Amino acid sequence: MRQSLEETDNSRTTDGRLARGEATRERVLDAAERCFAADGFEAVSIRQIAREAEVTLGVVGFHGGSKEELFKTVLARRSTTLDDLRTAALAELHARGDFTIRDLVDAYLTPYLDIASRGDPQWRAYAELIARVASTDHYVPQIRDLYDPTARLYIAEIQRLRPGASAEALATVLTLTVASMLSIVASRARIVGLSETATCDEPMDYRKILIDFCTGGIETALSRV
């Protein structure tokens, strides 16, 4: 019995350490996400991330590795969530049967708009980070493996509906669609300024107009190729 109690205590101690370690890792990743979003990859130092997370440099290195590795991890943990939601949405369309380009655009954009509208500051930081990353070709090697597989699934579905479209045209319309989505999520201040409204609505509030805009652009562009 005594040995059993000792084993139980050891198990609880181990579980507690694992839980604290995971919490620290998440704090490091959250801090890195905020720093990268605010200042960009090149301008951020490990020391800055450590200060933001309120941990030592060694803790950042232990949980994140090099700055490059930490950057990839920050991107990967959000992309997995989005990939799962987008894949599930596509599966629902297949189960339903016939669907349109607008349905595909909705299935691709809405998961991101929904998550970005939940008020989580970390997802807002991620949105700002992705908008920064997507604005240059410099980060293509880091994001290709994360986002391309699901993007190619949607491109294949659009091509099935528009079989005459070239690979370049399909890639272009999806890239422009993603750019519109990122713009709405990362910053809506320009809309507020031009429309002279008092506040920024949540990204999800722009769902219909964004889907209409992207669908119209895709259909018009692919009708000319």
Image (cartoon, rainbow, N blue to C red):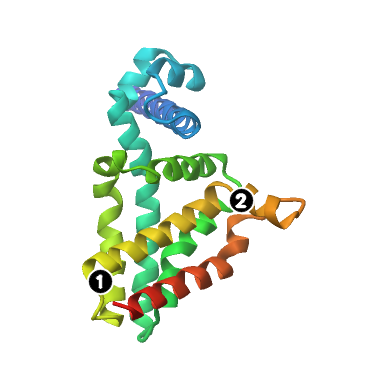
Locate residue 34, reporting x and y percent.
49, 32
Locate residue 43, reporting x and y percent.
41, 23
Q: Establish if 35 lies above or below 225.
A: above
12 relative position to 150: left or right: right
Callout 1: SS: helix
Q: Quadrant of residue 104?
A: bottom left
45 relative position to 141: left or right: right
Discs 1, 2 touching: Cβ within 8 Å: no
Name the residue located 29 percent from the left edge and 68 percent from the top edge. 170
Name the residue located 41 percent from the left edge and 65 percent from the top edge. 108
Q: Establish if 75 lies above or below 13.
A: below
Label 2 sits on residue = 188
Q: Split into 4 quadrants, where in the image is the N terminus?
A: top left
Whether residue 121 is visible to the viewer of this picture, yes or no, is yes
Give amino acid for label 2. Answer: Arg
Q: Nearer the viewer, mark 1 or mark 2?
A: 2
Q: Split into 4 quadrants, where in the image is the C terminus?
A: bottom left
Label 1 sits on residue = 156
